[in-house]
Amino acid sequence: MSNSHVSKSSVRSALATCVLLLASMTTGLPSAQAAPARGLDAILAAGTLRVGTTGDYKPFTFRNADGSYEGFDIDRAEALGKALGVKVLFVQTKWADLLKDFEADKFDVAMGGISVTLPRQKAGYFSSPYMREGKAAIARCADAAKYGSLAAIDAKGVRVIVNPGGTNEAFDKARLHAATVVMNKDNLSIFDRLAKGDADVMITDASETRYQQKLHKGALCAIHPGHPFDFAEKAYLLPRDTPLKMFVDQWQHIDENDGAFAAETAKWFQ
């Protein structure tokens, strides 16, 4: 049957049934595979989903002055909470503290433009990837032609600005040897500093270069975002609870097929 003949009410009903079935699976697991303290059962019992997010990575996650959050993954978190039938509570974290806070059980799932990496994979499960991209450069438009390759960026006298604790810093440490890396305390002021000339270029996720180009129209230009320096995927970091991962993956699959994911993508990335 084609997607056009499947009503949203029917798929949501099926998803609700999936919640109950997956929750019941944990009761029969052997002790060696017992669900962690905040697996699917615990989340449903508490009626809350704690979402860890940095709030500094537009358009995925941004923390407003009043403490509220907005962004693509904030909308996705609210949609996940609705699918589970629980309230979403956002927990502030930093890129440098994300794994430490996750392992300390400060939140149930990490969301907000999180790239799949081995250290993170060792700490929990990742959901099915929802975005495929890689690292690209962004610079002042007047200088963008100078930095069309990684070799041109990794040159003596070039200042590359970066935020601490995430995959941007890891990329710069691994791939840059001649350029000067300028550490910025956060990921919020970094693009204004780049536009002012405090640095020459930044290397970050291609999706962010496109978004910041739009925010700094005429001042900053993304450099070859369609042909990034490497390949990476974004996903949601989950505890090692199989029923929760199965549910999140199924929820993503349904949203990708009923138009909800496409609508949120258009809202934030186009």
Image (spheres, grey):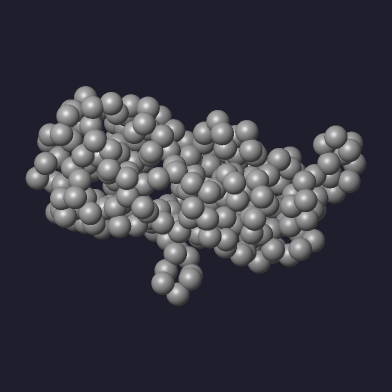
Q: Is residue 73 visible?
A: no
Q: Nearer the viewer, residue 21 or 101?
A: 101
- Please give the name of the residue rendered at 18% of the width and 35% of the height, measured from the top-left corner: 158
Q: Decide which of 61, 159 is in the foreground and name it.
A: 159
User: Quick one: 69 or 81, which is closer to the camera?
Assistant: 69
Quadrant for residue 200, please give it.
Answer: top left
Can the viewer see residue 165? yes
Q: Residue at x 57, y 62 (%)?
A: 90
As drawn, is 207 to the left or to the right of 245? left
Q: Residue at 65%, 46% (x, y): give it.
A: 103
Q: In this image, 196 relative to 97: left or right?
A: left
Examine the rendered structure and indicate whether residue 46 appears above or below residue 222: below
- Residue 264 image offset from top left, x and y in percent: 45, 56
Image coordinates for residue 130, horizontal then vertical, percent:
50, 42
262 sits to left or right of 250: left
On screen, residue 81 versus residue 115, left or right, reads right
Quadrant where the N terminus lies? top right
Instruction: Give me the residue at 29% from left, 47% from top.
Output: 210
In this rendering, is residue 242 above or below 13? above
**Which residue ends up furthest to the bottom in the rendered image?**
66
Whole-percent x, y for residue 124 in the image: 65, 39
The total number of labels drawn is 0
Q: What x and y, as percent, mark residue 116?
A: 51, 36
